[in-house]
Image: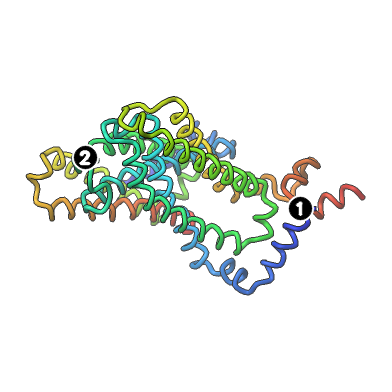
């Protein structure tokens, strides 16, 4: 499916007018994007490092996952809404940027992984899940979200 | 006087071969910058969990001191990496950074965030026995956590805006801005 019409529309939308005309607004939205990214990364790391038995070892992993998942959702909404606004400023440039598509692919993978695999699986009592499955979930999760963040940063360099 | 001293120091750093080397190397500079930004997730991510607990909105059934103690080490590891990469980024472009109003505000906010963290920690250690198990900590603790989040948000936004040239010395700026940004030569030219 070619998303060119969407990017073409975004490039001339009201969002694009604002993001291109007001550098200050763009910078503030970018701040929320970075803060959302930090919060998202923090929740992923705390949850996954607990599953790996590295962090918060004396707190049940189920408690850690339940608490971090709520704030992960909040962070994801912040990152995605601010991300759409930021994309509108350079929509056509992003359409032709390979690193942007690497980020979008890994972001899609990350969201699917969280809501289709990680979250449903971790709803079961953790002591009934094979410890290696928990570790595999954690390593996969950290790897995917690191790829999202790293490819996102690399858009600026490419 | 301070502006002249800072500029002289920055110009001295700028003469270093390593400074030019990092600045002119596309990959080294990019890797340092990417590490600096990505480590935000470790440092600010952990800080965010601690501050949200102090605000009473996460881990309400886990003692606040336990969250703070357990996440302190990874948070400090992130901070040290950010500090080292941050210094290298400054070292690569010392003159422009020294004369950046955003960089200067960032340093001030960093100092304020450090003071707040020090006071916050002292307050927390002195009184944690009385509220450690409370789902929502006392107001003074919540204020400290909110201040921490606001100050660090300020550090992030000013760090990001260093890249913009809105108030660089080569622009036409009011005298106060030249002074605040440390534009020594432009200030001298204005006074002539």
In this rendering, is residue A49 above or below B150? below
Q: Chain of mark 2?
A: A
Direction left: furthest residue: A128
Task: Look at the image and tell me whether residue A61 can be seen.
Answer: yes
Q: Position of residue B13 (x, y in %)?
A: 67, 67
Q: Position of residue A139 (x, y in %)?
A: 23, 55
Q: Is residue B88 left or right of residue A150?
A: right
Residue where numbered disc 2 is placed:
A115
Residues packed near mark 2 inside 10 Å, few (<14), some (14 to 19) or many (20 plus): few
State which quadrant residue B128 falls in. Answer: top left
Residues packed near mark 1 inside 10 Å, few (<14), some (14 to 19) or many (20 plus): few
Q: Position of residue A114 (x, y in %)?
A: 23, 43
Residue where numbered disc 1 is placed:
B2
State which quadrant residue B132 falls in. Answer: top left
Q: Position of residue A95 (x, y in %)?
A: 41, 49
x 74%, y 58%: residue: B7
> How many numbered marks does the figure carry?
2
Q: Is residue A27 left or right of residue B4?
A: left
Q: How is the image coloured?
A: rainbow
Q: Which mark is residue B22?
A: none
State which quadrant residue A128 falls in. Answer: top left
Which of the two discs, 2 and 1, sits closer to the camera? 1
Task: Look at the image and tell me whether residue A16 can be seen.
Answer: no
Q: Secondary structure at mark 2?
A: helix
Q: Which residue occupies the foreground of this view, B3 or A154?
A: B3
x 47%, y 32%: residue: B146
Alpha carbon separation for disc pair 2 and 1: 54 Å
Q: Chain of mark 1?
A: B
Q: Secondary structure at mark 1?
A: helix
In this rendering, is residue B38 above or below B148? below
């Amino acid at each position: 499916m070619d998303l060119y019409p969407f990017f073409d529309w975004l490039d001339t939308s009201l969002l694009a007018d604002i993001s291109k005309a007001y550098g200050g607004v763009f910078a503030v939205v970018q701040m929320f994007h970075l803060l959302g990214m930090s919060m998202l990364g923090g929740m992923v790391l705390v949850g996954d490092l607990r599953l790996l038995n590295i962090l918060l070892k004396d707190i049940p992993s189920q408690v850690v996952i339940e608490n971090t998942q709520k704030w992960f959702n909040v962070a994801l909404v912040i990152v995605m809404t601010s991300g759409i606004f930021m994309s509108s400023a350079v929509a056509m440039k992003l359409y032709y940027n390979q690193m942007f598509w690497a980020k979008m692919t890994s972001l899609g993978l990350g969201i699917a992984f969280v809501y289709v695999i990680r979250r449903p699986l971790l709803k079961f009592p953790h002591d009934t899940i094979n410890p290696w499955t928990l570790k595999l979930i954690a390593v996969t999760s950290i790897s995917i979200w690191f790829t999202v963040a790293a490819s996102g940063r690399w858009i600026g360099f490419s | 006087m301070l502006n002249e001293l800072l500029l002289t120091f920055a110009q001295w750093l700028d003469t270093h071969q390593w400074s030019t080397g990092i600045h002119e190397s596309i990959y080294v500079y990019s890797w340092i910058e990417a590490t600096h930004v990505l480590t935000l997730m470790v440092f600010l991510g952990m800080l965010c969990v601690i501050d949200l607990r102090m605000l009473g909105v996460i881990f309400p059934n886990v003692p606040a001191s336990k969250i703070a103690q357990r996440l302190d080490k990874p948070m400090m590891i992130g901070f040290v990496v950010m500090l080292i990469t941050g210094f290298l980024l400054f070292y690569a472009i010392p003159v422009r950074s020294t004369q950046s109003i955003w960089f200067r505000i960032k340093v001030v906010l960093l100092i304020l965030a450090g003071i707040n963290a020090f006071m916050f920690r002292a307050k927390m250690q002195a009184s944690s026995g009385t509220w450690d198990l409370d789902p929502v900590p006392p107001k003074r603790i919540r204020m400290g956590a909110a201040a921490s989040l606001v100050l660090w948000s300020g550090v992030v936004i000013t760090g990001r805006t260093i890249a913009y040239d809105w108030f660089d010395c080569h622009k036409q700026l009011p005298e106060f801005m030249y002074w605040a940004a440390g534009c020594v030569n432009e200030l001298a030219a204005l006074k002539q």
